[in-house]
Image: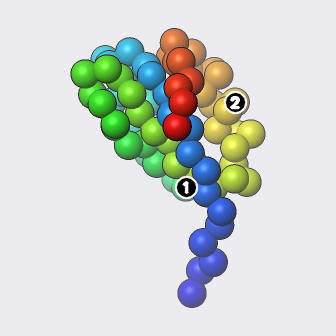
């Protein structure tokens, strides 16, 4: 049985037309993060990710330049 690592989450607001793009990019990075849409109309999404990949995830999000605004949990 595989040990489940500690996970964290980030909540962002992004342009609504970019939600699918971000989801597909994250699917290509198997195990990096899971995207959940909280409010499609407002563009609010949550990313769930293992703590050990947080630096890699932050780097990817910075390079994607999706005009993200981090929101409160």
Residue 66 locus on image (x, y percent): 50, 17
Q: How is the image coloured?
A: rainbow
Q: Quadrant of residue 60?
A: top right
* Residue that mark 2 sits on: 59
56 horizontally vs 12: left or right: right
Say above or below: 1 vs 73: below
Camera-nearest residue between 19 and 12: 12
Whether residue 21 is visible to the viewer of this picture, yes or no, is: no
**Cα separation between marks 2 and 1:** 15 Å
Q: Earlier in the sequence, mark 2 or mark 1?
A: 1
Q: Quadrant of residue 59?
A: top right
* Residue that mark 1 sits on: 31
Say above or below: 40 vs 54: above
Q: Quadrant of residue 20?
A: top left
Camera-nearest residue between 66 and 40: 40
Residue 30 locus on image (x, y percent): 52, 53
Whether residue 46 is visible to the viewer of this picture, yes or no, is: yes
């Amino acid at each position: 049985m595989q040990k489940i690592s500690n996970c964290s989450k980030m909540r962002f607001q992004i342009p609504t037309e970019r939600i699918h793009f971000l989801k597909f990019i994250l699917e290509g990075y198997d195990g990096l993060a899971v995207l959940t849409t909280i409010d499609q109309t407002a563009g609010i999404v949550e990313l769930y990710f293992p703590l050990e990949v947080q630096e890699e995830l932050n780097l990817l999000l910075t390079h994607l330049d999706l005009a993200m605004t981090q929101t409160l949990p």
